[in-house]
Image (cartoon, helix red, strand yellow):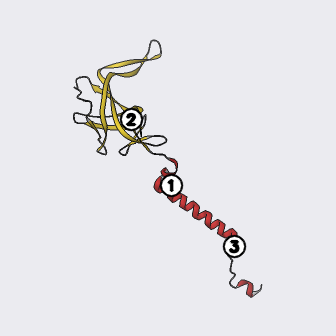
Amino acid sequence: MNTQQTQKTRRKLNAFDIIIIVLLLAVAGAVIYFGVTGGGALFQKNDTVEILYTVRVREIPNDVVLTLDKGDTVIDSVKLYEVGNIESYTTEPSPFYGQNEEEKSTVLGTYPDVKDVYVTVRAEATKSEEKYDVNGMRVAVGTAIYLRTPHFAGYGFCSSVEEVSGS
């Protein structure tokens, strides 16, 4: 072996190495961007719209007197943000599924002492491609919503969302 060959061998930076470094920096930048912003600035078009969303609060005892007035402010009882105003409410018997042993079938019945309350709320929302956002609360069918008014508090799931106007 030649002692000159074993001495310091310097590798020169060539065009291929520069391309690899630039690609690694681009990937690192993309990871940081999507990690910080969630990619929202690239893929979402945000508009302010007015929506009506309905929350189904299950199994409220029939002897509870509901005082839900149109226009009452609705608060997200977890984050304590205002998330709209009461538009209306309806009640229905709380359903359950049972087993009919004689016919070996599933039957739909209703509980005798409880009701489901459907609270419809009007709110200004920010619309993105797949959801509505009301003061930081995601509103979409199936989303859990904790709501509170001056005379009522409940927990339920969003059963419908309807856009009533846009800007």
Residue at the (41%, 18%) spot, across then down = 108
Label 2 vs 3, first from the N-terminus:
3
Q: Are marks 2 and 1 in contact (CB under 8 Å)?
A: no
Work out how far the residue at label 2 is from the one at label 3, CA to CA, in angstroms: 58 Å
| Mark toward the viewer: 2 or 1 | 2
Please tell me whether mark 2 or mark 3 is closer to you in this view.
2
Amino acid at dot 3: Asn
Q: What residue do we see at 69% from left, 77% from top?
A: 12
Going by the numbered disc 2, the residue's amino acid type is Ile
Q: In terms of sequence position, does the residue under pointer 3 or pointer 1 come before the other?
A: 3
Residue corresponding to mark 1: 34
Question: Residue drawn at (68%, 80%), measured in percent from left and top?
Answer: 10
Q: Position of residue 70 (x, y in %)?
A: 27, 30
Residue lying furthest right = 1
- Work out which quarter of the rendered image holds the N terminus and state it: bottom right
Q: Which secondary structure lies at badge 2?
A: strand
Name which of mark 2 and mark 1 comes first in the sequence. 1
Which quadrant of the view contains residue 99?
top left
* 59 left or right, relative to 22: left
Q: Secondary structure at mark 3?
A: loop
Residue 153: give x, y in percent of width and height. 26, 35
Label 1 secondary element: helix
Instruction: Tell me whether circle 2 and circle 3 mark residues in contact (CB < 8 Å).
Output: no
Q: Residue furthest front?
A: 167
**Which three-letter amino acid code belongs to the residue tagged 1?**
Phe
Q: Which residue position holds label 3? A: 14
Q: Would residue 148 be found to the left or right of residue 33 on screen? A: left
**Figure disc tally:** 3
Residue 103: x, y in percent? 47, 12
Where 137 falls versus 30 (above or below)?
above
- Identify the image quadrant of residue 66: top left
In this figure, which residue is indicated by the disc labeled 2? 51
